[in-house]
Image: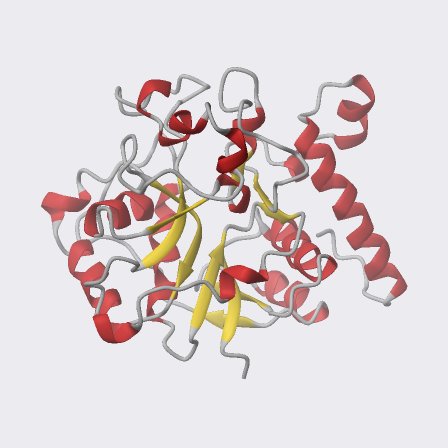
Amino acid sequence: MNRTVWTTLITNLDYLSGLLTLDYSLKKVGSKYPLVALYTDTFPPEGHAALKARGIPSKHIPYLLPAVHKDYSNDTRFYDCWSKLTPFSLVEYDRVVQLDSDMLALRNMDELMEMELDPPALKGNGSRVFAASHACVCNPLNKPHYPRNWIPSNCALTTQHTDPASAQTQGAPSTAGLAVLNGGLQVVNPSTDIYEKILGALQSPSSTSNYEFADQSLLSDLFPGRWVPLPYIYNALKTLRWEGVHKQIWMDEAVKNIHYILSPKPWDEEDRKKEEEGKSDETHVWWRRVNRERLDDERKRGIETDGF
């Protein structure tokens, strides 16, 4: 068994096209490591068949939720996000890099598998518990249910605007801005002790009731200043490229992994029509280009079309 893996959570069919294209993109950029799909009981048989047809390994995980219900009706995607904490429990692996299924690898980033983190023996008490990139707290779409302090002046990425060259190779300090990480990519040395701390937090209503962004809020709160900040290039939120957000630091040629946060997802759009009319987000065009490559490759390999 490979003891170093990429993982991604899948709970339904909505993100399956994203997962399949993520897997293809990791292979396309020459990653040495496999992607393992972490599925919950809610993942249906046709999804399992799609993974099997493409030779993508999968592993069942529990569907995590806090002890007391947290209302995410304004952003229902966060109900699933608690389960993204599961990689900390996968002690059969030495290193896990958790990726969201709405990501696309543009360049090889295998170096994440070898970066220095605290060993499990430190039980989550060291200064390099895991690695992640900062969340962008600019709220460019002005979502009314986001915290009021989510404004550009409080964003850790804003502090890097004056030195865009450094922003490609190092993240702002983990204590910068609101000190909130984005859970889309997490570099983890699995540890039973760390996972028990996480489960303990999930059992604390006084804590989870304040976690507006589920897993990433929990990790930011539980390990303040003790996570390694990665540069944005490993979790390049598509919104960072927009005018008025963080275009000052964004460099297309440097980005290694793009994250298609928010809706619509690239696979949900009427791609050709929007591209022809120039109405599609440019980064969505990148995804659809790779997706078409994937579908062509699958046809050549004799994989029957299943709609994904």
State whether residue 95 is above or below residue 252: below
Q: Is residue 123 left or right of residue 258?
A: left
Instruction: Indicate whether 111 appears above or below 224.
Output: below
- Of all residues shown, which one is farthest toward the right? 300
Residue 144 visible here: no
Is residue 30 visible to us here?
yes
Residue positioned 31% across, 66% down in the render: 118
Q: Quadrant of residue 58?
A: bottom right
Judge left or right: residue 268 versus residue 102.
Answer: right
71 sits left or right of 142 in the view: left
Instruction: Name the residue: 58% across, 52% down.
Output: 13
Give the residue furthest to the bottom.
1
Question: Residue 304: x, y in percent?
Answer: 81, 63
The image quadrant where one finds the N terminus is: bottom right
Q: Nearer the viewer, residue 210 or 12?
A: 210
Disc tally is 0
Asked whether 214 or 149 is in front, the reply is 149
Task: Tell me how the rendering is colored.
Answer: secondary structure
Location of residue 248 with respect to 9 vertically, above or below: above
Pinpoint residue 82: horizontal percent, then vertical percent: 33, 52
Residue located at (22% from left, 71% from top): 122
Q: Nearer the viewer, residue 176 or 196?
A: 176
Identify which residue is drawn at 40% across, 64% down. Answer: 116
Q: Position of residue 270 (x, y in %)?
A: 73, 30
Q: Residue furthest left?
A: 206
How far across and down, in percent of the image, does residue 217 sit?
A: 27, 43
Left or right: 165 in relation to 289: left
